[in-house]
Amino acid sequence: MSDYKKPLPQVEPYTQAFWDGTKNGKLLVQTCSDCNARIFFPRKQCPECWSTNLGWMEASGKATVYSYSVTYEGVEAVFKDDLPIVLAWVDLPEGIRMQTNIVECDSDSVHIGQDVEVVFKAVTDDITLPYFRPVA
Amino acid sequence: MSLAIVGIAEVPTKRDPERTRWDMLTEVCIGAIRDAGIGKDDIEAVISVNPMAQPQMALDMALGRVPEVLGLKGCKDICVLNAGGTSTTNCLRLAKYFIENKQAKFVLVPHTTVQSDIPTEDLINFFATAPLDMQWEYPYGVTFNGAMGLITNRYMHDTGATAEQMASVTVSLRAWGALDPNSIFHGKPVTLEDVLGSRMISTPLHAKECNFLADGAGAMVVTSHEVAQELGKPAAYELGHGVRFTGATPVLRDDPYFHRAYRESSQDALAEADLGIDDMDLRQIYGAYPFTQCSALEGYGACAVGEAAGIWADGRCGPGGDLPCTTMGDATGRGHTGSGVSMAFYLDTVRQLRGEAGERQVKNCHHAIVTTSGGSVMNAATTVFGSEPR
């Protein structure tokens, strides 16, 4: 896994728990214990009320495609072997929208409103990226 | 008192590494000052557009080389501003502050960019990393085109715009560009078949609907309305301005294709100008991707939501149409000069209001609305200009 050449997420101290979660097969959503906001991306403080009284909830792993784009060209060299790449914005029922890739799919069949589910891929010893795939 | 653009100069958008940054910059600065009909020492401030992805040039400009090279002996201070595509807008805002506070009578606003000497891989990396989040977007292979593909697909889903209608936007933009000696596509119109038949880059965006990175330079001389009138030459008078921030990260925006930002920024600008959207003779929309040409028209209230793509498809926004839009061609019809695209938008608006736009001249062009955006459309900055002061 150490030969992974693609860019890794630049982890901040206050996002470490998210990446610890994915490493353990959990998709965590940051929550505000004061105003109950669901927060993405994770912050050092709640962007709604500036509380630092923050926690995490485990997401169900289900999501719906809000939008997508299938990339065929124009990526950096390290991504070329992955083409076509299915970029997607997915809405989680827990109340956040995140950027991901749709994997294990026919790229032509991906569509807005499609039901997808999280799948974890360990890309290095430290980093596991959450991707999504169509619900069978 | 408000701002007036009284002098302009531009070098045509091309890919030509033989033209150096300083060679082009010197040419446009001298050209704009001469066009204003003033002397070089009348310039009291130089507020420059930050040249993105060109660190040495950015430092040269930030640390004061422009007035030194040009011998601007009256220059009291310099500043470089960077907000990506809205850098030029910020330059105009700061120039207005200098002018209104009597710190400067004339301000020079220059831009220069050479991208043809930067390796393609570096440019892809720059445009992928500059406006995207390094933790939550970049690891997934998101590029600038990919982010805009995501937005475009949702825009089409929500408005019912078809692929053919969206492609027609590029046909019209290239039609303007084909008539424009400053466009890299001068004399090179495209058909709907050309656009739809070009390589797919990131769905739904074909190659001809994406940006062609190029080199360019432009400069403006600005002053107050009163001084502009004393100069006694045609000028572009700023009548109103408004801006809205949408957010830095595309996936997080609750205004995903910017209807609200276009609506509110244009309402502020039009209210200050005491004019309505129907008073505008020209709409200049800098969004760099075709959906923005539709979304802005809808946000302005120039048509209903869901109608704009059809209006473009009917040819009403292109040459000869009754709703002329973006005679500058936008980045897809003109060539993308980094942070200089918005400079080129203002220069083209001045040409239109001065009646100097040649074959692209909009008839009786007295009022124009111009929207610029920075980053991956982190904001919409809308300005109303007139050929006469208020």
Image: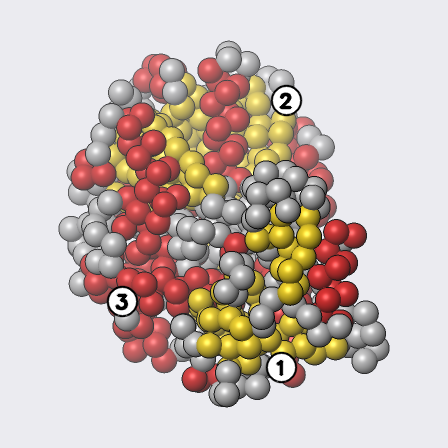
Give the foreground label among 2 and 1: 1
Foreground of the two, B258 or B375: B258
Q: Which residue position is annotated with label 3?
A: B160
Mark 3, residues whose alpha carbon is within 10 Å: few (<14), some, or many (≥20)?
some
Q: Mark 1 lies on which chain?
A: A
Q: For the point 57% across and 53% down, which residue is it?
A: A38
Q: Which residue position is annotated with label 2?
A: B77
Residue type pointed to by label 1: Asp
Q: Which residue position is annotated with label 1?
A: A82
Q: Which chain carries label 3?
A: B
Q: What percent of the width, then of the height, locates residue B240?
A: 34, 28
Mark 1, residues whose alpha carbon is within 10 Å: few (<14), some, or many (≥20)?
few
| Residue B280 located left or right of residue B182 | left
Q: What percent of the width, then of the height, locates residue B344?
A: 43, 45
The quarter of the image holding the C terminus of chain B is top left
Kindly indicate whether the residue at mark 2 contacts the one at mark 3 (C-beta within 8 angstroms): no
Give the foreground label among 3 and 1: 3
Q: Is mark 3 on a helix, strand or loop?
A: loop
Foreground of the two, A134 or A108: A134
Does residue B318 show up?
Answer: no
Taking B298 as reference, is B196 above or below it? Answer: below
